[in-house]
Every structure is written in C-alpha cells, then in structure tokens.
Image: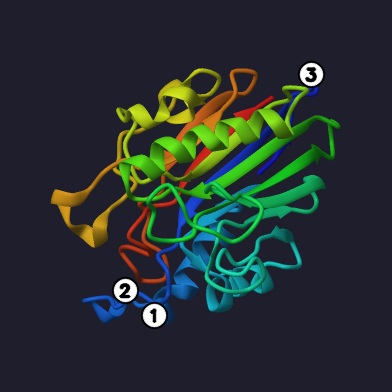
C-alpha cells in the first residue's frame, strides 16, 4: 500500500506472480485453476499490492477473472500474446487507480519481430512484455514498469534480456526510475543477466529485509525449487523490503507452482 513520507518520498508495493496457466493438466486435482482461483484472488485482496504483474495467465478465464473481479480498485493493461488481443497468455498488470495515473503503455514481443505476435530466439512459445509509464498521484513522480515471462532456452534468455534492455533504453531516454518484474526462468547466476546488471539491481539482493525462499515451488517438489522470479530496479529506487509469500490462502497450501513475490520500494 502506498505511503508518502513527510519529505515527499513515495513508497509503493510491487508484486510479481506466476499464476500457473489454467490449461495445465495437474496431477493433483486440487491444483487445477477452478479449485484455486478464489484462493489466488484472496491473496491479492489480502496483500493489496499497488502494482502487480502476472505471468502464465491465460487471457480468457484467468486474466479476465482478475481484471473483472478487481476492477473497482485496479486499472489493467494486458493483451493475449498469441494474437495481440485476447488469445493465449498475457504479461499484463493491475495497478491501483487511487495511487497511480497511467500515462502510456504498450506490449512488444520478445523476438526478432517485436511489433507483431511472434516467437523467435529458438523459443517454442510466443513471449511478450507489457510496460506502463506511471505517475504517482500524491507526488507527481514518474516511473516505468516492465513485466514479462522469459523463454526456457539459453538463447531465448540471453537474446531476450539483451532485447529487453535495448527496449528499456529506447522507451526511457530520460532515464527515469524503472521497475522490471517477471518469471525469467533462470537464476541470478545466469550470464543471461549480464546486460541487465549493468544498469539495474535485483531487489532481493539489495533489500535490508529479505529472504532466500525459492520462488518456484514446483507444487512442493523440493528437488526442483529455484529462485527464478524477480523484481529488478534502477539504482535510483530503494528497496526497503523483499518478501516471498508462502502463506496459505483459501485452504490451499500452495495457490500456484510459484510463490508471489513483492518488494516495498521508495523513490
């Protein structure tokens, strides 16, 4: 929840959440989307992030569920990655209308043809990134927000990050504060992040209050757990606290095969 200190510094909460797409055939029926959708919604209503980026969220049935259920409080930006309208997954986000004014937004594909629905860099699926330019209502401060779900292959991760970094610089020539979240499908030791590390930092690593809980819980398979979800920030943003939310909601020990992560940020 956004607060403003006496000096005019804006503090806001940003969340990244891989929901686990609804078309997956789960071994445990309790993990199916219909059985956990209300638990996911309960998490959002409990945590009340100012801004939340989603990954692996099917436009029809998942994104539309969150968007419509929270429409009274949150604005939304998101399109289907398979046709640029309403088909496939979205990398969309929700933002509190009372906290932010959306100044501009867009989506590009993480491929060699970013302006049209596409896959490239040897990746099996379309991968897209949705971004927004915001103004904090109480302070007038502006910032960019980028949200994505990277590919699974080494080449798609390296080429994808390099392309995203280029787009960040292209869209943000003034160099205003920038936040980048997502399921990046690899851990912090990966060389894929080399170009990103040149001008952004991982909020998990710089927060004075943080944790080391794997963000990918693999539905409880301890052998597959990894930290692969991130909230990156430019150095002009401070991360006061980083949190991996392992809380059960709606009677579900796990509401997705990823835990939601959040960061309390200050400009």
Lower sequence index among marks 3 and 2: 3
Looking at the picture, tell me which residue is in the foreground, 35 or 7: 35
Q: What separation in Å lies between label 3 and label 2 (alpha carbons)?
A: 46 Å
The residue lying at 73 percent from left, 34 percent from top is 171
Q: Earlier in the sequence, mark 1 or mark 3?
A: 3
Q: CA distance from mark 1 to mark 3?
A: 46 Å
Residue position for label 2: 31
- Answer few, some or many: residues within 10 Å of disc 2's Cα (few below 14, many 20 plus, some between 14 and 19): many
Say which of marks 3 and 2 sits in front: 2
Query: How much space separates mark 1 and mark 2, taking CA atoms?
Result: 7 Å
Looking at the image, residue 193 sits to the left or right of residue 225; the answer is right
Whether residue 65 sits left or right of residue 250 in the image: it is right
**Local SS, label 1:** helix
Return the mark for residue 7. Answer: 3
Q: Percent x, y for residue 39?
A: 45, 70
Spot occupied by residue 164 in the image (x, y as percentages of width and height) = 56, 37
Query: Horizontal placement of 147 versus 245: left or right?
Result: right
Asked whether the residues under the numbered discs 1 and 2 touch, taking CB atoms below 8 Å apart as contact, a structural biologist would say: yes
Element type where label 2 sits in the image: helix
How many numbered callouts? Answer: 3
Residue 234, numbered circle:
none
32 vs 128, nearest the viewer: 128
Contact? badges 1 and 3 (CB < 8 Å): no
Q: Nearer the viewer, residue 16 or 174?
A: 174
- Name which residue lies at 32% across and 47% down: 153
Residue 210 position (above or below residue 152): above
Identify the image quadrant of residue 251. bottom left
Q: How far from the left and from the top, in percent, is residue 254?
A: 32, 63
- Figure quadrant of residue 238: top right
The residue under label 1 is 35
């Amino acid at each position: 929840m956004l607060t403003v200190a006496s000096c005019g510094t804006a503090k806001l909460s940003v969340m990244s959440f891989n929901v686990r797409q609804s078309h997956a055939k789960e071994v445990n029926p309790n993990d199916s989307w219909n059985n956990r959708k209300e638990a996911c919604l309960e998490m959002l209503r409990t945590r009340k992030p100012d801004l939340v980026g989603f990954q692996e969220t099917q436009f029809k049935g998942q994104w539309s569920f969150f968007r419509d259920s929270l429409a009274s409080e949150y604005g939304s930006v998101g399109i289907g990655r398979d046709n640029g309208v309403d088909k496939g997954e979205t990398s969309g986000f929700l933002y509190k209308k009372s906290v932010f004014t959306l100044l501009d937004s867009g989506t590009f594909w993480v491929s060699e043809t970013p302006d049209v629905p596409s896959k490239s860099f040897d990746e099996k699926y379309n991968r897209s990134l949705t971004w927004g330019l915001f103004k904090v209502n109480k302070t007038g401060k502006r910032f960019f927000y980028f949200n994505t779900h990277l590919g699974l292959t080494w080449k798609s991760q390296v080429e994808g990050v390099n392309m995203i970094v280029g787009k960040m610089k292209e869209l943000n020539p003034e160099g205003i504060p920038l936040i980048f979240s997502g399921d990046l499908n690899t851990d912090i030791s990966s060389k894929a992040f080399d170009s990103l590390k040149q001008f952004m930092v991982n909020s998990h690593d710089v927060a004075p209050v943080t944790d080391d809980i794997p963000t990918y819980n693999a539905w409880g398979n301890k052998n597959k757990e990894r930290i692969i979800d991130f909230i990156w920030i430019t150095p002009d943003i401070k991360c006061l606290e980083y949190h991996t939310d392992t809380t059960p909601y709606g009677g579900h020990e796990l509401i997705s095969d990823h835990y939601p992560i959040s960061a309390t940020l200050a400009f």
